[in-house]
Image (tube, rainbow, N blue to C red):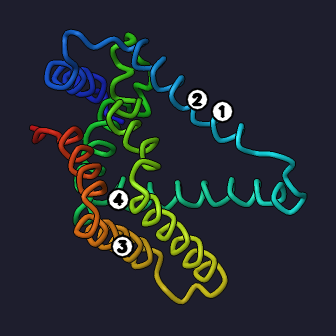
Amino acid sequence: MSAAAPSEVDRFRAGYRAREIGPRYAGWAHFAFTSAASLAAIGGSLSGVHAPKAWELALVPIFFLFGNVAEYFGHKGPMHHKRRGLDLIFTRHTLMHHHFFTEARMECESSRDFQIMLFPPVLLIFFLGIVAAPMLELTLRSWFAVVEGASVAWLREGTLARERLESWLVDQLVAMLATTARHDPATASQLSAALRNTAAPTLG
């Protein structure tokens, strides 16, 4: 990294804070809300588990692996490469997060910098509130099944280039969400709120 890089990061951070972090933002409150809501969701899920069978427990590490595969494709796909319909994810992650934090500047200078690391509260509510939109939950479960099946086939056969697989999976998600939104007002409302509240300004 060049000697000028730290000053470039400083300028980007200053500009981002001025544009994106409001004067009333409280980093520790954001962190507490995110942690409490996530732990409550985990606790609520665990409270519904009663006398699990051995085969059900054996699925736990499989789903941990699936979660990591999804994380891998998320970063190798729309988070680091602009994809049609998912521009906001690319902007938020690559153009903002990776300009705010670099290999030379990984530290937070204050709790206000939590804003660039944590999910916006509206997105957390969106993900945890999926249960309030059964059709949206069904759509995402269906897409997860597509990802799982496609990933296993790709790892076994490897006949398709990774970049084409990533692009295809993203296009599948966009198409499935758009179709569900046309048929289900609750899904349309959830998606509209999430996109409206994560819209980012053009970066100079």
Q: Which residue is mark 4?
A: 78
Residue drawn at 29 percent across, 49 percent down: 190
Name the residue type under label 2: Ala
Mark 2, residues whose alpha carbon is within 10 Å: few (<14), some, or many (≥20)? Answer: few
What count of labels does the image hold?
Answer: 4
In the rendered view, does 143 fall on the left or right side of 18?
right
The secondary element bearing badge 2 is classed as: helix
Q: Quadrant of the N terminus?
A: top left
Q: For residue 101, what is the image quadrant?
A: top left
Tell me which numbered mark, 3 or 2, is placed earlier along the sequence: 2
Crowdedness near tag 4: few (<14), some (14–19) or many (≥20) residues, C-alpha within 10 Å: many
Could you tell me the amino acid type at mark 4?
Pro
Q: Indicate the amino acid at tag 3.
A: Ser
In terms of sequence position, does the residue under pointer 4 or pointer 2 come before the other? 2
Q: Is residue 68 above or below residue 50?
A: below
Packing grade of label 1 (10 A; few <14, some 14-19, many >=20) is: few
Q: Are marks 2 and 1 in contact (CB under 8 Å)?
A: yes
Q: Could you tell me which secondary element the residue under label 1 belongs to?
A: helix
Alpha-carbon span between mark 3 and mark 2: 34 Å
Q: Is residue 13 left or right of residue 127?
A: left
Q: CA distance from mark 4 to mark 3?
A: 8 Å
Judging by the rendered image, the residue that carries numbered circle 3 is: 167
Looking at the image, which residue is at 43% across and 49% down? 130
Query: Circle 3: is it few (<14), some (14-19), or many (20+) Cα within 10 Å?
Result: some
Circle 4 — which element? Answer: loop
Alpha carbon of mark 4 to alpha carbon of mark 2: how far? Answer: 29 Å
Circle 2 residue: 40
| Relative image position of residue 120 (x, y in whole percent) | 33, 32
Question: Does dot 3 land on a helix, a strand or a loop?
Answer: helix
Going from N to C along the chain, the mark reached first, 1 or 3, is 1
Q: Provide the residue designation for mark 1.
A: 43
